[in-house]
């Protein structure tokens, strides 16, 4: 790890909602923007959303898959002139086509996961950040209304464990991005609406409780506003893709389908007891406290697996309701269901 690693810790911390203004500032001043952040906090997604909103053209380069030919173009031999020249790389050609189509509309050249670029590519990116061209095509400079934005994980979260060299880093204005719990929930809602718009109809009034469980909404640990602790959006995207598939295959999707998909993708101990219409609004099976435990309905208990049944029983026994007739009956019911599941597995 080089001597500039961990320097991001002293950077200005910004929220995802502040990134569009930073991009506009860099566009106006002719500077480049580098966004540090924990994996999954929405660095790439906020840039993609800006393009979806129609404000910018977006051209993306995945730094991890870049080679010199991809960045700089490949050498082409001209038999007529007996000379070699470099072909314009596809990403650069797209930028000029966008500019020709609408010269007034700004563009973002987004370089994702900058720390994963190999050394040979970093040299070319360094020139791109300074002279706005690649080494092989010095006369083809980026149009003035193109802003270069890059995103990267912090050094400890990079697969190679390396931060950027000082010369490359100085080509950018750098910030450290995070997402507040409320902003993150809005962000995940947008993913749900895009991938599986019928989810709200399926879950009804249990919609918000479902999201609290699935995104692992631990606000107490988010209070420093610099660390990201929510479920990775890529994982949640897999959940909604699974739900979308089930709905397309079966013509409909049930709450139990959603519960199963959540366990197989997100992996949290989410319980369908939270989402059944019969369950009171205060049921929070994965976050039960000794003050607000409410016993799930028999139907909800029937849908739980062995781990969820055990957790629910523990939560009930910690509550004063455990000594009531209803509490005792619930514990007996749980024990019967657990025994049934064990016999089923034998």
Image (tube, grey):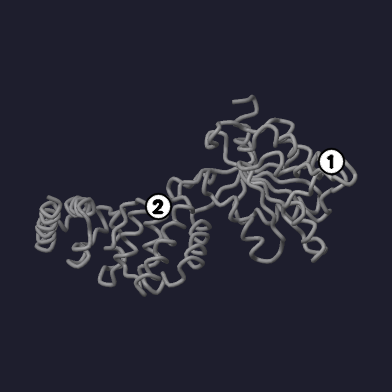
Q: Quadrant of residue 166?
A: top right
Query: Where does the image place residue 244, in percent across and percent down from the top left?
Result: 42, 66
Please, is residue 258 above or below residue 224 in the view? below
Splitting the image into 4 quarters, where does residue 49 fall? bottom right
Q: Residue furthest front?
A: 79
Judged left or right of residue 219, residue 106 is: right
Q: How far apart, in angstroms, are the residues tagged by discs 1 and 2?
A: 56 Å
Residue 104 picture location, percent across and down: 82, 64
- Is disc 1 surrounded by few (<14), some (14 to 19) or many (20+) residues within 10 Å? few
Which residue is under mark 2?
216
Residue 163: which disc?
none
Q: Residue at x 22, y 65 (%)?
A: 300
Please identify, in this view, whether the residue under mark 1 or under mark 2 is nearer the observer: 1
Screen quadrant of the N terminus:
top right
Instruction: Return the x and y of residue 14 as percentages of the image width and height.
Output: 62, 48
Q: Which residue is mark 1?
A: 84
At a point 90% along the width and 44% down the height, the residue shown is 81
Residue 283 in the image: x percent, y percent?
28, 62
Q: Which residue does the image show at 37% across and 57% down from the upper left? A: 213
Say if 171 sits above or below 249 in the image.
above
Q: Secondary structure at mark 2?
A: loop
Q: Is residue 252 above or below residue 149?
A: below
Pick the front one: 139 or 277:
139
């Amino acid at each position: 790890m080089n001597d500039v690693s961990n320097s991001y810790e002293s950077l200005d911390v910004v929220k995802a909602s502040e990134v569009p203004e930073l991009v506009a500032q860099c566009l106006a001043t002719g500077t480049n923007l580098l966004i540090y952040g924990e994996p999954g906090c929405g660095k790439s997604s906020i840039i993609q959303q800006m393009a979806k909103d129609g404000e910018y053209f977006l051209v993306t380069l995945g730094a991890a898959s870049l080679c010199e030919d991809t960045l700089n173009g490949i050498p082409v031999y001209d038999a007529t002139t007996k000379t070699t020249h470099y072909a314009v790389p596809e990403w650069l050609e797209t930028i000029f086509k966008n500019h020709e189509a609408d010269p007034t509309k700004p563009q973002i050249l987004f370089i994702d996961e900058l720390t994963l670029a190999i050394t040979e590519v970093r040299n070319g990116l360094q020139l791109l950040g300074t002279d706005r061209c690649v080494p092989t095509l010095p006369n083809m400079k980026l149009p003035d209304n193109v802003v270069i934005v890059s995103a990267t994980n912090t050094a400890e979260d990079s697969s190679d464990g390396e931060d950027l060299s000082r010369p490359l880093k100085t080509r950018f204005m750098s910030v450290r991005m995070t997402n507040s719990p409320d902003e993150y929930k809005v962000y995940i809602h947008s993913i749900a609406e895009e991938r599986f718009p019928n989810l709200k109809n399926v879950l009804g009034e249990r919609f918000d409780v479902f999201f609290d469980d699935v995104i692992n909404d631990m606000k107490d640990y988010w209070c420093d506003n610099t660390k990201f602790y929510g479920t990775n959006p890529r994982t949640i995207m897999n959940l909604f893709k699974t739900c979308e598939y089930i709905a397309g295959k079966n013509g409909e999707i049930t709450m139990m389908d959603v519960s199963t998909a959540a366990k197989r993708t997100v992996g949290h101990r989410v319980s369908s007891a939270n989402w059944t219409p019969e369950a009171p609004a205060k049921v929070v099976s994965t976050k039960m406290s000794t003050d607000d435990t409410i016993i799930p309905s028999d139907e909800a208990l029937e849908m739980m697996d062995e781990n969820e049944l055990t957790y629910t029983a523990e939560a009930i026994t910690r509550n004063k309701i455990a000594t009531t007739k209803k509490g005792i009956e619930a514990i007996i019911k749980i024990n019967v269901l657990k025994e049934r599941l064990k016999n089923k597995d034998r």
